[in-house]
Image (tube, helix red, strand yellow):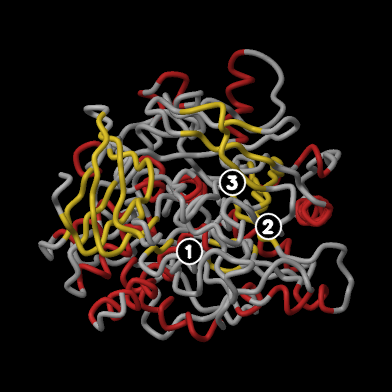
């Protein structure tokens, strides 16, 4: 394929890459998409209707299937065969790779919360981290377009941490569960409000997709397209234009440049043959995920770019952030032995606890700078390999006790904002390569006091809310014990940060690298901060906005 020329090569088929390809092809631009993983068709491959009882160990996770036997990720996870990564001494970091068409959109929780003005301008407020190079109001219309295209259910609440969508954009949210209403009442006693979770799950049919009928876990994948993933929406819609070509099993080795340092195309390894292939194009877009895109750039050295491509600032691989994470839960006595009924809904929380502490932080009442939220796990879910409660006894009495506890356990998952620090970054390990001879990423990681203080506050707040429900969570762990590992929430961002200046950032606000005007990054690597909300909606919104800008630049002959 060395002689094939395309307008744009997009590396990656997940949230950023697929949205960029969709927007560009709709604008008449010919796109070639490269995906490092294998082809995947959710309509024929997803184990959507499989039940835990049909799986080994009642569907429990294992080293090959971290999120359960029927998780939609087919060839990826924390460990990927033939693709190692390394860590500095004292570092614990987990790097999730999807390695399938559609990338992480086949796996994510589909939480779709907008970032707010608070989130974009954190440094202006507390002097920490970096501001984004634009205002919320500039992005708001693009959030509307993305939510409409993707299909997000939820509701405008007036909550200060949840900017409203324009009228008619959001689809109707599902009805709250009894358990969530109980949490809402308990949190209200502390002055904390719950709100409908915004989620990329269709509650009304849209384009080529059907609405959710609340029957099977979203994590299995969704053959009807109700749970958003690019393989059932953006990619087939882009293909309908006739302008998108997709090549899978294409592991990009480098972005190539000419003698002047300008990008000319990419070199990738065809994983089926093991041979290198070269492609040329007017523009290259990296959307391979934050750390994979940074790895490609750092491996793309040349005479003009001796420290890696687009790295004249030395910021490629720096500023990596994940979300903070911690779990806490308890069996709620008031929920024991309640009548059985189907309360599946879409298989995640219908209500959640948004961050409520902006005003307290403004008054200096908290010892950490940024916010967090709680996602609620509860309800009559399909039984798995474990049972809630410290059960004792044998035989029928034990079974009766397990039945009494069914649906009575409530868990909170804390997801919070992390600030960038000098100890969290990636580089290239010059001693280790993957199966195809490509040098691997080496990670460095250390949580700061900001994150640990935040976790401590979250655990203590959760304990009070559980006590209001009559539940005892027991003795709290220390923040160091409770906080999950770096990368474990799979929200890593910031490795190719955008900014106002080429001296301290990798791209401008359009994802265009300062060093090469025909090289773009359209994944979470460009994030200037990592608000406590899931990053995927904002990845797609930025990709839509920036691809629209790119298409205009190309039509005008600027690029």
- Report crowding for label 2: few under 14, some 14 to 19, many 20 or more residues within 10 A (C-alpha): many
The residue singled out by tag 2 in the image is 416
Residue drawn where x is 78% and y is 73% of the image: 127
Q: Is residue 341 visible?
A: no
In terms of secondary structure, where does tag 2 sit?
Answer: strand
The image position of residue 107, as x and y in percent, is: 41, 45
N-term-proximal mark, 1 vs 2:
1
Q: Which mark is residue 489?
A: 3
**Discs 3, 2 touching: Cβ within 8 Å:** no
Side (left or right) of 30 relative to 512: left
- C-alpha distance separating marks 1 and 3: 15 Å
Q: Position of residue 8 (x, y in %)?
A: 25, 62
Quarter of the image for residue 333 reads top right
Image position, residue 372 (x, y; %): 69, 61
Mark number for residue 431? none
Write the residue at 44% across / 73% down: 510
Q: Which mark is residue 112?
A: 1
C-alpha distance separating marks 1 and 2: 15 Å
Q: Do the numbered discs 1 and 2 sit on residues whose CB atoms are within 8 Å? A: no
Q: Residue at x 47, y 82 (%)?
A: 140
Which quarter of the figure is the N terminus placed in?
A: top left
The residue shown at (58%, 48%) is 377
| Marks 1, 3: nearer the viewer | 3
């Amino acid at each position: 394929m060395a002689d094939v020329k395309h307008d744009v090569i997009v590396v990656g088929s997940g949230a950023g890459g697929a949205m960029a390809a969709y927007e560009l092809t709709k604008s008449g631009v010919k796109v070639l998409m490269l995906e490092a993983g294998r082809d995947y068709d959710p309509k024929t491959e997803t184990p959507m209707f499989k039940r835990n009882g049909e799986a080994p160990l009642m569907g429990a996770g294992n080293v090959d299937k971290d999120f359960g036997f029927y998780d939609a990720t087919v060839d990826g996870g924390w460990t990927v065969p033939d693709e190692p990564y390394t860590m500095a001494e004292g570092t614990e970091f987990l790097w999730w790779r999807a390695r399938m068409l559609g990338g992480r959109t086949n796996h994510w929780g589909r939480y779709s919360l907008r970032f707010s003005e608070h989130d974009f301008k954190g440094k202006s407020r507390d002097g920490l981290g970096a501001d984004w190079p634009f205002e919320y109001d500039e992005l708001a219309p693009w959030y509307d377009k993305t939510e409409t295209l993707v299909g997000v259910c939820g509701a405008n609440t007036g909550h200060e941490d949840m900017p409203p969508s324009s009228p008619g954009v959001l689809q109707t949210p599902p009805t709250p569960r009894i358990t969530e209403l109980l949490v809402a009442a308990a949190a209200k006693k502390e002055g904390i409000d719950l709100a409908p979770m915004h989620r990329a799950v269709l509650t009304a049919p849209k384009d080529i997709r059907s609405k959710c009928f609340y029957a099977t876990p979203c994590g299995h994948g969704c053959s009807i397209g109700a749970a958003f993933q690019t393989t059932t929406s953006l990619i087939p819609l882009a293909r309908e234009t006739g302008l998108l070509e997709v090549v899978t099993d294409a592991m990009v080795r480098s972005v190539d440049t000419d003698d002047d340092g300008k990008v000319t195309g990419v070199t990738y390894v065809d994983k089926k043959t093991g041979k290198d292939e070269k492609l040329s194009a007017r523009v290259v877009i990296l959307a391979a995920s934050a750390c994979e895109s940074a790895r490609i750039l750092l491996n793309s050295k040349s005479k003009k770019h001796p420290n890696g491509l687009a790295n004249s600032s030395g910021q490629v691989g720096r500023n990596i952030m994940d979300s903070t994470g911690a779990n806490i839960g308890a069996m709620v006595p008031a929920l024991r032995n309640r009548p059985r009924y189907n309360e599946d809904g879409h298989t995640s929380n219908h209500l959640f606890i948004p961050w409520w502490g902006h005003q307290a932080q403004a008054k200096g009442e908290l010892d950490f700078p940024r916010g967090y939220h709680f996602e609620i796990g509860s309800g009559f879910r399909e039984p798995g390999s474990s049972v809630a409660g410290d059960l004792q006894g044998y035989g029928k009495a034990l079974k009766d006790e397990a039945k009494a506890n069914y649906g009575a356990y409530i868990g909170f998952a804390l997801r919070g904002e992390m600030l960038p620090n000098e100890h969290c970054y990636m580089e290239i390990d010059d001693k280790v390569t993957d199966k195809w001879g490509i040098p691997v990423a080496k990670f460095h990681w250390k949580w700061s006091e900001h994150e640990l203080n935040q976790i401590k506050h979250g655990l203590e707040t959760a304990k009070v809310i559980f006590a209001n429900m009559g539940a005892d969570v027991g003795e709290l762990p220390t923040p160091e014990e409770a906080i999950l590992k770096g990368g474990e929430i799979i929200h890593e961002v910031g490795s190719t940060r955008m900014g106002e200046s080429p001296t301290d950032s990798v791209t401008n606000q359009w994802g265009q690298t300062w060093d090469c005007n025909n090289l773009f990054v359209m994944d979470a690597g460009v994030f200037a901060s990592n608000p406590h909300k899931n990053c995927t909606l904002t990845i797609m919104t930025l990709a839509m906005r920036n691809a629209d800008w790119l298409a205009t630049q190309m039509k005008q002959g600027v690029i």
